[in-house]
Image: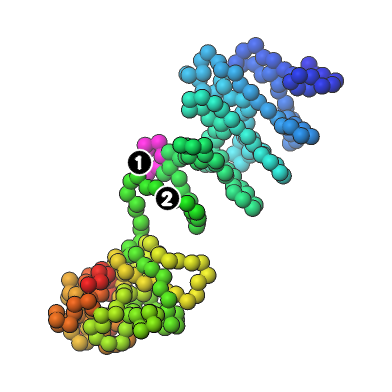
Amino acid sequence: MVSPGPVEFGAVEGSGDSLLQTGVLGKNTAGGRAVHGISDGGIGVTGDSLPAANADTDPDVNIGVQGSGVTGVLGQDGRSTGKLATSGQQSGGHQVGVLGIGAEVGVYGSGNRVAGVLGAASPGTAGVQGEDGGHPGSLAGNFIGNVAVSGNVEVGGDLLLTNQDIAEQLPVEHAPSCEPGMVVVLDDAGIVRPCWTEYDTRVVGVVAGSHTLKPAIRLGHAPGRADGTPVALVGVTYCLVDADVDPIAVGDLLTSAARSGHARKAAEPARSFGAVIGKALAPLRRGQQAIPIVVALQ
């Protein structure tokens, strides 16, 4: 039934008497649009579904608008230049406002200036919630690339990090002079520089990032900052050591060496207090080389 003018609900109205019948059917075999809605101020296409008797056993009966597409084709494509491209609302229980199920991507969002997907939460709820479904190896959320957080992060379980040390961005006198793996100390102005004396109590750590070991946590990091370098304060990192003064065995305590930027075995306990960098995790009989150590300032 087609209406020539304004009606209460729509210009086109269709009805079906069973689940196998369609209220409104649009079909286009030439590659164009089967159904297209344009609105000057309201909603171009809207779909409402009333509760059905078998809604608990058949979740498909209460879908307001459903779109299905073959591989590589969008089932539902919503685009907007100013407001919402696609809007879904539900009330009561755990009903879903927008549901996306796909062989690869269920819901895809791309934003030019603000956000690809935006979720706003009412008090006591989450703006965006992801659940892993309890399946081994599945993830509640997966981010590829950088993630910025302007508020607090609450973690109820373990925080698993693949990298192995905690570093802090500290000011250096000349950043290129502090290479990854170097032992660094503070000068009288509180600026970081490579060590140059044995058993120096001003030692603060090892420049992070040598070989394959990168900082798991970086404190004081500011994008674009050129006057600082990340210094490993805790954890496992590679450190330049000088074994010519004393051979180094696994478990030996290490302190600053006379060779610039290197560590040596802390062979004199009386001089080592306050000057220990950490503990060797690999041996070195002679020469200079970077070995893994666990940083533990003492």
Say which element carries label 1: loop
Write down the region rendered in magenta: 132-138
Question: What residue would you read off at disc 1?
Answer: 136
Which of the 4 quarters of the picture holds residue 173? bottom left
Check the image and report above or below for 206 versus 196.
Answer: above
Image quadrant holding the N terminus, namely top right
Location of residue 266 in the rendering, given as x and y in whole percent from the top left corner = 18, 80
For label 1, count other residues whose C-alpha is less than 10 Å away and answer few (under 14), some (14-19) or many (20+).
few
Q: Which amino acid does the dot numbered 1 rest on?
A: Pro
2 vs 1, front mark:
2
Image quadrant holding the C terminus, namely bottom left
Q: Is residue 29 visible to us here?
A: no
Q: Which amino acid does the dot numbered 2 rest on?
A: Val
Which residue is depicted at the point 30% across and 66% down? 234
- Name the dominant secondary structure of the magenta segment: loop
The disc placed on residue 153 is 2
- Frontmost residue, 270 versus 38: 270
Check the image and report above or below for 125 versus 256.
Answer: above
